[in-house]
Image (cartoon, grey):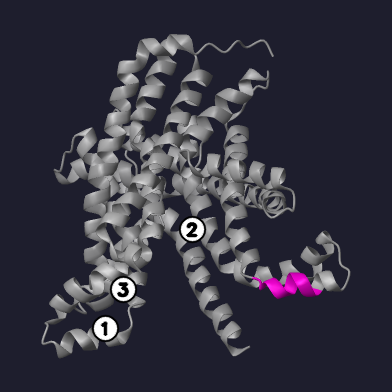
């Protein structure tokens, strides 16, 4: 039997961590883009748009992420697309995080006082101009801390992609465990690596919240 | 697209589905109650407890909140046996849920405790209550009332997260879906139906928690 040193285990896990990071970044950017679109629908003047966005958000927030992975994985196959695991993983994570980001950002847009809408309307701005020049810049300040905080959820969400066969940190953990028979060490290390990825994000979210809040109080 | 949806044959498997639903509900009932209790204890420690215990609880909360539930589950189920602690699938699943919800609810409840006006503590003290009595009778219930909506959402999130326990072969609803899928190769139908059941469960659970909140905190209605 081959002996595995702690360094062998750690090196393999760290190599797989690249995929966790890549998938997190892609999902965050994709989710942000789709989420922004959803946000516009959610606060649109048309009731039908608002309803569509509301049901979308309800659907993705009310079902397990794991099930969304399964459906993306098997569902895309029905359309004759040969689904590699990374495609299903990226797609499901993007759609899932879009729902949460849209809802977070809606709260931030609603935190902008009503008078700002009225003032910009009185300057003859259209809906898009109001958003672009008046509302979003102000909402952005409120939105940064919870958005950074949510990125932690995305990093943790990528762990589930191991179940549909995408080889990232969690999957590597399982593979290495099967080779070394040291589940305690391996999963402990995996947890620590996730912690090292997530904790700086959580911490900076807290710090940003405090900073931006203090600035707000001084106004 | 030449796929024909057929949901009829799913009826054959209704015992598995019902069993899965019951186990998912059992997981969230036990996990919810014990998890929130653990959360209350940890919140008490972080806000008012003894100084030596604070860093321990803080480490626990940060570790759990910054690692995926799946890894916590694997660590408990596969990792702990090396320390001589062998747990059955369901016990491991329950333990993971309690530990997970405990950390999240700790932070939520702590926010509620910290929003309590200082005068409330002083009032308790002036009635010759001990620190613990003040916490139990004056601070805790209004704190929980304040954060009940946030706590309810967290319980729903943990319920949805519980689908992961199928990975250690705990026979919850997702396990049933996987079982049906492997028997019939009708993946799409099996997962659509179980996802819909989860959606219904999530909506129901939210309603139930709102009703429960109304019972525990009757003052809200009176106000």
Q: Nearer the viewer, residue B32 or B56?
A: B32
Disc 3 marks which residue?
A: B113
Q: Residue at x 53, y 57 (%)?
A: A150
The verdict on a common chain for dots 2 and 3 is no
Left or right of A149: which side holds B143? left
Between the residue at mark 1 and the residue at mark 2, the CA separation in whole angstroms equals 40 Å
Quadrant housing residue A144: bottom right
**Is residue A14 in the magenta section?**
no
Q: What's the chain of the residue with tag 2?
A: A
Between the residue at mark 2 and the residue at mark 3, the CA separation in whole angstroms equals 30 Å
* Residue extending farthest front: B222
Left or right of B102: which side holds A75? right
Q: Is disc 2 placed on a helix, strand or loop? A: helix
The mark that comes first in sequence, 1 or 3, is 3
Disc 1 marks which residue?
A: B120
Disc 2 marks which residue?
A: A197
Q: Crowdedness of circle 3 by 10 Å Cα count: few (<14), some, many (20+)? A: many
Is residue A114 visible in the rendered structure shown here?
yes
Number of numbered callouts drawn? 3
Query: Where is residue B176 shown, x and y percent of the image?
Result: 36, 23
Callout 2 touching callout 3 (CB < 8 Å): no
In this picture, is B19 found above or below A126? Answer: above
Magenta-drawn segment: A112-119
């Amino acid at each position: 039997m081959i002996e595995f040193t702690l360094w062998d285990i750690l090196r393999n896990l760290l190599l797989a961590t690249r995929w966790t990071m890549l998938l997190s970044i892609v999902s965050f950017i994709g989710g942000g883009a789709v989420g922004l679109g959803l946000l516009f629908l959610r606060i649109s003047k048309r009731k039908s748009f608002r309803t569509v966005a509301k049901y979308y958000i309800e659907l993705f927030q009310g079902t397990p992420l794991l099930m969304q992975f399964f459906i993306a994985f098997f569902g895309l196959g029905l359309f004759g697309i040969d689904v590699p695991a990374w495609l299903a993983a990226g797609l499901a994570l993007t759609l899932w995080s879009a729902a949460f980001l849209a809802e977070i950002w809606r709260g931030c847009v609603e935190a902008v006082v009503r008078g700002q809408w009225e003032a910009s309307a009185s300057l003859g701005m259209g809906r898009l101009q109001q958003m672009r020049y008046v509302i979003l810049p102000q909402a952005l300040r409120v939105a940064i801390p919870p958005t950074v905080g949510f990125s932690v959820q995305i990093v943790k969400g990528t762990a589930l992609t191991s179940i549909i066969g995408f080889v990232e940190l969690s999957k590597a953990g399982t593979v290495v465990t099967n080779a070394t028979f040291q589940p305690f060490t391996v999963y402990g290390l995996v947890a620590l690596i996730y912690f090292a990825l997530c904790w700086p994000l959580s911490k900076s979210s807290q710090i940003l919240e405090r900073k931006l809040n203090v600035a707000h109080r001084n106004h | 697209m030449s796929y024909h949806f057929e949901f009829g044959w799913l009826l054959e498997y209704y015992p598995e589905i019902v069993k899965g639903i019951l186990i998912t509900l059992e997981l969230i009932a036990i996990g919810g109650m014990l998890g929130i209790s653990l959360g209350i204890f940890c919140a008490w420690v972080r806000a008012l407890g003894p100084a030596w215990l604070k860093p321990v609880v803080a480490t626990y909360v940060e570790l759990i909140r910054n690692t995926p539930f799946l890894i916590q589950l694997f660590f408990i189920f596969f990792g702990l046996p090396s320390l001589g602690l062998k747990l059955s699938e369901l016990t491991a699943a329950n333990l993971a849920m309690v530990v997970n919800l405990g950390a999240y609810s700790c932070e939520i409840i702590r926010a509620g405790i910290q929003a309590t006006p200082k005068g409330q503590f002083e009032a308790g003290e002036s009635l010759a209550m001990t620190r613990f009595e003040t916490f139990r009778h004056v601070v805790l219930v209004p704190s929980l009332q304040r954060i009940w909506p946030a706590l309810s959402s967290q319980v729903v999130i943990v319920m949805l997260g519980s689908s992961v326990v199928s990975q250690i072969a705990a026979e919850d609803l997702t396990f049933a879906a996987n079982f049906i899928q492997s028997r019939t190769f009708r993946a799409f139908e099996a997962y659509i139906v179980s996802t819909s059941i989860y959606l219904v469960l999530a909506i129901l659970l939210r309603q139930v928690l709102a009703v429960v909140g109304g019972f525990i905190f009757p003052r809200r209605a009176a106000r």
